[in-house]
Image (tube, helix red, strand yellow):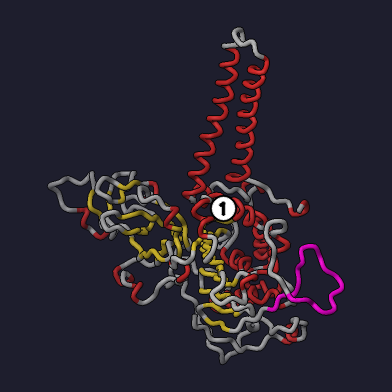
Amino acid sequence: MAVAPQTTEPPKEEVELDWLSSSPPVSAWTTTEAEEVLEFDWLDQWYPFAPVCDLDPAAPHGKTVLGLRVVAWHDRNAGEWRVFNDACPHRLAPLSEGRIDGKGRLQCVYHGWCFDGRGSCEFIPQAPALGPPVHKSSKACASAYPTVVQNSILWFYPRAGAEHRDVLQRKRPPFVPEMDDPCFTTAIGMRDFPFGYDVLMENLMDPAHVPYAHKGIVQGLSYKEDPGRAESDVERGGPLKIKIEEANLDGFVWPQENGGSFWYAAPCMVHYSSLVPRDEKKAGGRRFMLVFMCVPVAPGRSRLIWAFPRNFGHLLDKIIPRWFFHIAQNKLLDSDLYLLHAEERNFAAAGSENWHKAVYVPTSADAIVLAFRNWFRKHCNSQVGWAAPTVEQLPASPTRDTLIERYWSHVAQCASCSAALKDIKALEVALQLASVAVLGFLAATLQRTTSPVHRAGLVSLAVLCMAASRWLDTFVRNTFYFQDYVHAHK
C-alpha cells in the first residue's frame, strides 16, 4: 500500500515527553496553512456486507451500513449476490422481509412486486395484463448498488445509478491475497457492537490494552526488557516501540521489527501480519494474520467482520466446527465491550472534536491510536460521512445484559453458530425426553423388576440425562445468549 509519510512535527509538549526511544506518533493536531488537507469521501469506498458463508442464498438479508438500510440477496439467474436499497419503490416496505420467488427474483411480500438482479421491476400483480406497462417505469425500479465477492466477503459500493455500475474498473475493495491462498486456512466471523465506528477502530489499533482488558483470555504483545524498571504487574504490560512511518488520505503503515507489519486501509480494514514467534528465524516459516473489517452502522453502532488467515493448523478447521472457535472469540469481544460503550459516552460528553484535549497519551504505546485519531480529525473532521440523513446522537444506554448479549449481535447472523444452537437445543430436549422415558419405564415395570441393581441403574440413567440437559441449558445461555465478564474477578 503506497502511503506517503507525514512530516508535520508534534506539539512541543509532546516532544518533551519520554517516548521510550521511539519517535512520536504521526503528526500534530494542528495543520499548517501550507499543508493541503484532502477530505475523505466516505461514499467513494467499498463496504463489507457479510461473509458469504453466513448468507443463505434462499432468503434476503437486511443490514444497516453507513446509515443505509440495505438488503443482500442471491440472484440465481446470474449466479451473483446483489445489494439493493432496503425499500420497495411501491410503498417503501423493507425488501429484506421478502422472499426469492420461483423465478429467482426478489419479491416484496407487502404487495408482491418482483425485481430482477438489476433492480428492474418485472411483475406488479395489481397491474392489468392488458393495461399500460407500469412495471417498466423507472419509478418502479429498486435501487441496486455495485457488488463484488472478494476474499469470501460480499462487498458493496454505496452509490446507485448507471454512472457507478463499472466502479470496479476504477476501484476495488482492499485485497488480502492470503485469504484466497490454498496454503492458508482462514477463521472468519462477524458481530455487531453498541458503540461507534471510531471507538471500534481505535480499540483494534491498541495492542497495549490486550493483557488488561482481556486478562485470562489472551496474552498481550511481548516487549523487550525495560532498563531501570522497578515495578511490574502480573499482566506483564510494558513499553511498546511503535513508529508510524507512512500516512496519507488512504491510511497508514507501521512496519514491525519482527518482520511483520500493520496497515490501515481507510475506512474499513485493519491488517496485522506476523510470524509465529518460534519460527521467526526460519524462511517461509509459520505465519498468521489478523484482518479486521470495521463497518460504520449508525451513530453508536458498528460491526466487525474478522478473518484470521494462517498457513498452519489446517486440520483443526476441518475437524472443529466454526462455531466452536466463535465461543472464545465472543468471550474476547465481550471482555471490553462495556468499557468501550461507556468510553464512547465519555468522549461524546467532551465532544468528538476535543478528543485530543480530553485524553492523556504520553507513551508510544498509543501511537497507532493517535495516528487514527489524527487521520479521522484531519480528513473527516472527526465524523463519519453517513450516506443517509442521520442524527448525530448516541442511542440510550441499555442494561448490561442487553448490552453484552450475543444472540442478535452474532449468533443470528452466523450460519455455524445458529445451526449449532438449533442442534444443541434439540439434544437438550432429547435428553429430557429420555429421562422421562426411563422413569416411565421404571414405574411401569416396578412390580416386575426385582433387581435393586437394575432399578438403581435406571434411576442413575434418568438422573444423568436430566443433569446433562441442565448442563446444556447453562452452556447454551452462556455461549449463545449472555455471559458477563467481571474484570475484578479476573
Disc 1 marks which amino acid? His
Judge by depth and name the residue closer to the eye, 224 or 488.
224
Q: Is residue 409 above or below residue 453?
A: below
| In front of the other: 199 or 255 | 255
Q: Quadrant of residue 207?
A: bottom right
Q: Dot 1 corresponds to which residue?
A: 326
Question: What number of labels is visible?
Answer: 1
User: In the image, residue 373 lies at what x, y percent?
Assistant: 62, 74
Residue occupying the point 34% across, 46% down: 99
Q: Indicate whether residue 362 is drawn in magenta.
A: no
- When the figure is inspected, residue 211 is found, relative to residue 381, above or below; the finding is above
Residue nearest the viewer, comparing 407 with 219: 219
| Span shown in magenta | 224-241
| Residue 454 relative to residue 124: left or right | right
Identify the residue at horizontal 33%, vertical 60% (top origin): 143
Q: Does residue 298 show up?
A: no
Tell me residue 98's x, y (percent): 35, 46
Q: Residues within 10 Å of mark 1 (few under 14, many from 20)?
A: many
Q: Is residue 426 left or right of residue 16?
A: left
